[in-house]
Image (tube, rainbow, N blue to C red):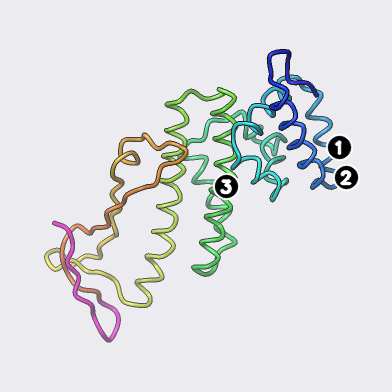
Amino acid sequence: MKLGKNIPEWLQTEFERKQEQFVNVLNDEQCAQFSALQSDVVFVQELTAVFLGSEFFFESSLRHPDRFFALFFDDGAGRLVDQQPDYASLAQSMAEFLLQAQSEDELMHVLRVFRQRQMMRIIWRDITRRAETLATTAALTVLADVCIQTAVDFLYQRACVEWGTPIGAQSGESQSLLVLGMGKLGAFELNLSSDIDLIFAYDESGETQGKPRSTQCVFAN
């Protein structure tokens, strides 16, 4: 597959090498799916740009071809690659993934898989300009938001069982953990290489209750 008259020969060679490497890890069904996708000129152009433009996407595709093909085949709700991620859709998808998690280790695995699948979608949409820059930063931010909230909800309940529920000294009511996103996360400006800075807090100070030994907690006011 030629990339175009103005593409340097070394870049043509690099793409062909990557495409061959990818095809070699596919099973028979996936090879047939890939051939079908290549009949679309737009797909071929976009594949070229993404394989050459993102080593993360390429390596992820090699290790998990199923996650590559999940982007392009309609599961009843439309192709993922055509859809801009939003909080509601990501939260629903995460809830389905979370059914697989019964322990903290399983939660971490679910979060890693979910993040990689969504990052592949976001990267494809970004490099091919299906999404503008602000749409990409918004998608990355809501992805981080969903992952953080999922981890907090999952682990908070287990922490309460193990150490007791935090109770506010003034209100006498249980305190939910607050997570404040700082910097680019708080400003909805995450990019593909951003880390995140978080502050954890409660509404008021108090102690944990419900266990033989309570723990004094100093919460944010």
Q: Which residues are the magenta region?
A: 209-221
Q: Relative to 31, is 68 on the left or the right?
A: left
The residue that mark 1 highlights is 32
Check disc 2 and report its element: helix, strand or loop. Answer: helix
Residue 21 on image: x %, y % = 77, 42
Spatial distance from mark 1 to mark 2, Cα to Cα? 6 Å
- Please tell me in which quadrant of the rendered image residue 77 appears: top right
Magenta-drawn stretch contains 153: no
Q: Quadrant of the C terminus?
A: bottom left
Which disc is residue 149 wearing?
none
Closer to the chain start, of discs 2 and 3, is 2
Magenta-drawn stretch contains 219: yes
- The type of residue carrying mark 1 is Ala
Closer to the chain start, of discs 3 and 1, is 1
Rendered position, 201 above or below 57: below
> For the point 37% across and 71% down, which residue is it?
159
Q: Nearer the viewer, residue 27 or 147?
A: 27
Q: Relative to 188, is 53 on the left or the right?
A: right
Spatial distance from mark 2 to mark 3, Cα to Cα? 24 Å
> For the point 70% across and 34% down, which residue is it?
72
Q: Do the numbered discs 1 and 2 sit on residues whose CB atoms are within 8 Å?
A: yes
The residue that mark 3 highlights is 116
The residue that mark 2 highlights is 28
Residue 117 on image: x %, y % = 60, 45
Q: Main secondary structure of the magenta part?
A: loop
